[in-house]
Structures are given as C-alpha cells and as structure tokens.
Image: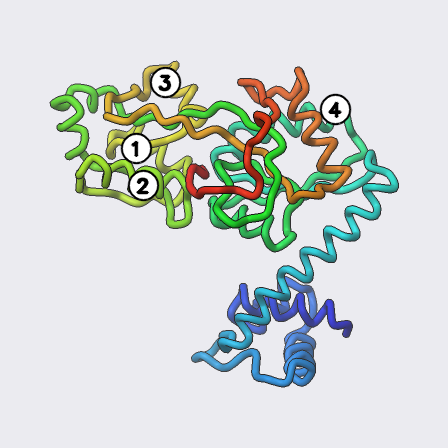
Amino acid sequence: MTTEARLRTLVAVADAGAVHTAAGRLTVTDSAVSAALAALTREVGVPLVERQGRGLRLTPAGQTYARYARSILGLHEEALAAARGDADPEHGLVRLAAVTTAAEHIVPPLLGTFRDRHPGVDVSLEVGTSDRVWGLLGAWGADLVIAGRPPRGLDVTVRAVRPNSLVVVGAPGQAGQAGPAGLLGARWLLREAGSGTRATCEALLASLDADPPVLTLGSNGAVVAGAVAGLGVTLVSRDAVTRQLAAGDLVELDVPQTPMSRPWHAVTRPRGSAVAGLLVAHLLSDDAGTGPRWRRPRPGRRSPAESSGGGM
C-alpha cells in the first residue's frame, strides 16, 4: 500500500472513529485498514491511534499528523487537476465548495448554465458550514468557494462578489408583536454551530443587549421551515426566503441594524486553476443565472482576507 493510501486510511479512520466504518468507506477490508495504520505508525515513529471503547481515536500526535495528511492529499488532488486542466481546461475538474444557502439557492442555476456552455468539465460540490468550506480551501480540498467574507489569515484571492442581504423574518403573526423590542424577546431560530449566519445573529443580539430564548435547528432549510411554522424569528439571507416572502408565508421584520449587507464572495487560492477560471468567467457573464449580477471586486480589495464572519 502506498503512502498516499495510508494517509487516506488515517483520514478515513479520523472521520469514522472505527476501523470497520473506515474500511466500508474505502471499500477495503478491516485488516487492510489495520495494516495501513500500523505501517504508517512505523513510518512516523509515534503512536497515531489508540483504543477508545469499541472504537479508535487519534492520539494528539495523530490529530496533528491527520491535519497535515488532509493538506497533503488535497494538494495532490489539486496538482493532478491543475496539470490535467492546464492541458485541456474544457475536460478538467473543478472542486467547488459552497455554504448551505449558496448551495441551495445560487449554485444550482449557476451549474446548469455552466454545464450547457462547458459540457466536458466535471464539477464536484461540497456543501457545508462556513467553517467547513474555508477549511477545505485552506487545506487544498477545494478549488473555488462560494460563501461570505473569507476569514482572517487565509491566503486567498476574491474573484467575484455579489450583493446579499441578511434580514430578520418570521410568520405574519410575528409582525404583530410589540415592535422591535417585542421581537428581541421572541424565540430566535439559530443555525448549527460553525455557520457564519449563526455567528452573525449571535453578534447582532449581543450588540442589541438582547438575550432571547433560542432554538437551534440543524440546517438552513429547517430554520426557514421553522419560521414559516411560527416557531420563532430568524436572521437569514434574503436569497433563502425570496419565495416565502413573495407568497406571504414570511414577512420581513423591523429589527435594528437590519437588513445587513453581507455580499457573497467567489474565492480561490492566489494561483487558481485554469478550470476554476472557466467557472469564475461564467459566474461573471450575463447568463450565469444567479439573480443579481456577480462583479469583479473593486481595485484594492484585500487578499488575503482581513476579517471573518458573514458566511451563510
């Protein structure tokens, strides 16, 4: 088994927490996973995993090594894609990562029109929280990210920006509460941990000196559905509730400091791949199909990123 395969095995065990589950994901036998871990441990020279009940967990050294392993594997995949894409961009691969709201409401029409224009390009899509997608870009696990503002310290280049507003919405009955003060005492629906929208909502409530009851729901779709059902109010991208606002299922609520401008960003590492360049060029074209137009960042827009937050 090659070192690359051993690294993939370690990462799979780190994700799965059990040899049998990792073996299933890798389509190999349990014994092959155990042998790969043993060989990698001998190569590194320190224990990488240890028993925890009926499963395994990484040792502190294993956690450190696994972080590097993810970067090594991601960089290798990027190198392969870049070499093949530079030779023939129209038949290359672009690894796209997007936060949930963008993946649900912006990426599908974008990919539909992109595939019409570039049918030979393969596109993979990873969907996750803001923390997840920026982590992928930082570890060379994605070529292009569509999300909010990149976090501080990540060496990236902003290729395009698009308007986006965060608004507070609730079922029509919520508007009858006693103005903004009453809304700040209502139940607020929050996204999962790691979501940029959740962090922004918590910061908003803190700035307004509000400590309302909260209910955490596991996805953007669940938050919107909960608001429609009258479970509470929430801060959400207008892109995610356009249909519900038009139908009257939700109404925009008057809360201080909102709406909040949180533009979408299309971001690559400084070099970027030729195939990712095709997708960025399409994003900036007239027929991208993403609603409001994407535009190149203003001259002087920083890269790497200067601040965090704003991811959806």
Task: Say if residue 144 shows up in the picture.
Answer: yes
What amino acid type is highlighted by mark number 4?
A: Asp
Q: Mark 1 or mark 2, which is nearer the start of the sequence?
A: 2
**Where is residue 177 drawn, in percent x and y?**
14, 23
Residue type marked 2: Leu
Task: Determine contact: label 2, label 1, CB under 8 Å.
Answer: yes
* Residue where numbered disc 1 is placed: 234
In the figure, residue 159 lies in which quadrant?
A: top right
Q: Which residue is mark 4?
A: 116
Q: Are marks 3 and 2 in contact (CB under 8 Å)?
A: no
Question: Can you say whether 278 is above or below 22 in the image?
Answer: above
Tell me the number on the disc at residue 190: 2
Residue 227 vertical placement versus 11 (above, below): above
What kind of element bears circle 4? helix
Crowd class of label 1 (few under 14; some 14 to 19; many from 20; radius 10 Å): many
Q: CA distance from mark 4 to mark 1?
A: 36 Å
Q: Which type of secondary structure does the marked residue at label 2 adopt?
A: strand
